[in-house]
Image (tube, grey):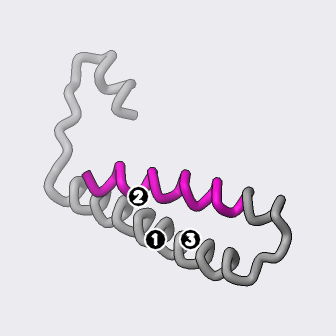
Amino acid sequence: MAFLLATCGVRFIPSALDFDKKLTEADAYLQILIEQLKLFDDKLQNCKEDEQRKKIEMLKETTNSMVESIKH
């Protein structure tokens, strides 16, 4: 819709409410990622197979990088 408005010469100006909604949504996704990190730690403690451990460690590293990039 914003694209359609922009092509018609109408400019969309987000409100404070729109900003708050997006901020709440981003925070919810961040919390999901943090919970995933905790689950990866639990899985690593119980993991006995090297191949599986490597996959979980890679997922944890990628998830941690995403969390850190969001924080900064």
Q: Which one is in front, 72 or 44? A: 44
Q: Quadrant of residue 59?
A: bottom right
Q: Are marks 2 and 3 in contact (CB under 8 Å)?
A: no
Q: Are the residues flagged by discs 1 and 3 in contact, CB closer than 8 Å?
A: yes
Q: Which residue is mark 1?
A: 34
Q: Specify which label sits upstream in the sequence, 2 or 1.
A: 1
> Pointer 2: residues within 10 angstroms few (<14), some, or many (20+)?
some
Residue 24 forms part of the magenta stretch: no
- SS for tag 1? helix
Circle number at residue 67:
2
Query: In the image, which residues are magenta?
Result: 55-72
The answer to whether 44 is drawn above or below residue 63 in the figure is below
Judge left or right: residue 8 versus residue 44: left
Distance, label 2 to label 1, CA atoms, is 7 Å
Report helix, strand or loop for mark 2: helix
What residue lies at 40% left-to-right and 34% top-to-bottom? 1
Q: Nearer the viewer, residue 32 or 40?
A: 40
Residue 44 in the image: state x and y as whole percent: 68, 75
Q: Is residue 7 above or below residue 39?
A: above
Pointer 2 with pointer 1, Cβ within 8 A: yes
Residue toward you, 44 or 30: 44
Q: Which mark is residue 58?
A: none
Q: Which residue is depicted at the point 55% across and 51% down?
A: 62
Residue 24 position, x and y percent, is: 31, 66
Q: Amino acid at mark 1?
A: Ile
